[in-house]
Image: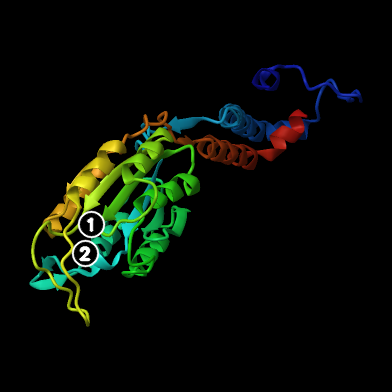
């Protein structure tokens, strides 16, 4: 385009122009004006050429790449099934928190609520360890729903006794999934009934891909009496049975002596099954820069045509 503008040849025309060999005398007075216009035309040609280069650059879509953004490593999906005992023995007040006596089930509910709130796994389900056992909440990733379900658990809600074997069979039937499955049984191990032994049921559960941990509640000896009307005779925690269940399930047993032991046990269980996935491929944001050369090019075109539009018309 610039070469054609500077060339002595005019743009091709379909109509041959008629010219005189000697221009009129009065036309010579306009030579100075034509010189000025020629200078303006040269400046306009340069602006137009620069504008075309900038417009071509804008069409190339220039971008700026930011620093790589690495996504945080995600935790491997883990389904957590909480099995909470509700036998009558869970009313015994074995624990003290801030000088106030608290029963076994109240202790479990308080710390399970904090644990679910900060849980980093996938989904949580809830089963009541009773006679008969009860599916209290199917697997869900809504933590608030799980916390509400925990708050509604009361003693003897699933009967006065416990059937651990039937409860674990219920877990195997209701919570089959492709994700890693962890069962946390919270119980004092007392008042057991049922045709299937707890260790046998746990071993079957282990073969189906479940890992079972046990949190044992209650003292092994003492004279704790419920403050409920009528009172309760002391029922010690059956730690031997709970230990056998944890061993058969490929997990561990944690006996809760004080409030801080509950947090330690839950954190240990979560840590054992917190295996981060490899980080995703780093991504980089693209910041588009084409508006800058596009705007400058359009501005130069405006200046070029506004400087001497007649020169372009005469050239054509």
Q: Residue furthest right?
A: 15
Crowding at mark 1 (Cα within 10 Å: few <14, some 14-19, many 20+): many
Q: Position of residue 199 (x, y in %)?
A: 31, 41
Q: Depth check: give the residue in front, 138 or 307.
A: 138
- In the rendered structure, the answer to whether residue 174 lies left or right of residue 316 reads left
Q: Position of residue 281 (x, y in %)?
A: 42, 28
State the quadrant of the C terminus: top right
Q: Position of residue 303 (x, y in %)?
A: 58, 40
At mark 2, the secondary structure is: helix
Q: Depth check: give the residue in front, 68 or 258.
A: 258
According to the picture, the residue beneath numbered tag 1 turns out to be: 188
**Residue 223 against residue 82 in the figure, above or below:** below
Q: Is residue 156 in view from this perspective?
A: yes
- Exactly how many numbered labels are in the figure? 2
Crowding at mark 2 (Cα within 10 Å: few <14, some 14-19, many 20+): many
Q: Which disc is residue 104 wearing?
A: 2
Residue visible at 29% across and 61% down in the picture: 113
Q: Is residue 76 in view from this perspective?
A: no
**Residue 33 against residue 231 in the figure, above or below:** above
């Amino acid at each position: 385009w610039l070469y054609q503008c500077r060339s002595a040849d005019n743009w091709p025309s379909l109509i041959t122009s008629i010219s005189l060999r000697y221009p009129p005398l009065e036309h010579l007075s306009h030579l100075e004006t034509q010189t000025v216009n020629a200078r303006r035309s040269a400046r306009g040609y340069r602006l137009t050429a620069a504008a075309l280069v900038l417009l071509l650059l804008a069409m190339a879509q220039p971008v700026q790449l930011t620093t790589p953004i690495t996504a945080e490593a995600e935790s491997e999906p883990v389904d957590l099934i909480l099995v909470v005992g509700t036998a009558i023995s869970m009313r015994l007040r074995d624990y003290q928190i801030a000088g106030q006596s608290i029963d076994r089930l109240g202790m479990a509910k308080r710390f399970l609520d904090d644990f679910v709130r900060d849980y980093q796994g996938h989904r949580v389900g809830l089963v009541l360890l009773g006679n008969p056992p009860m599916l209290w909440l199917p697997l869900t990733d809504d933590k608030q729903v799980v916390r509400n379900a925990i708050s509604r658990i009361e003693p003897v809600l699933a009967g006065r006794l416990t059937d651990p074997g039937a409860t674990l069979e219920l877990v195997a039937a209701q919570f089959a999934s492709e994700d890693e499955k962890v069962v946390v049984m919270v119980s004092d191990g007392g008042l057991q009934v049922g045709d299937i032994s707890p260790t046998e049921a746990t071993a079957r559960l282990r073969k189906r891909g479940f890992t079972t941990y046990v949190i044992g509640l209650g003292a092994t000896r003492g004279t704790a009496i419920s403050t409920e009307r009528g009172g309760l005779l002391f029922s010690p925690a059956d730690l031997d049975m709970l230990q056998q269940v944890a061993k058969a399930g490929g997990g561990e047993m944690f006996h809760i002596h004080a409030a801080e032991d509950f947090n330690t046990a839950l954190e240990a269980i979560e840590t054992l099954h917190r295996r981060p996935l490899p980080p995703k491929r780093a991504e980089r944001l693209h910041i588009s820069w084409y508006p800058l050369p596009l705007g400058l090019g359009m501005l130069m075109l405006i200046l070029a045509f506004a400087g001497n539009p007649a020169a372009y018309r005469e050239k054509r």
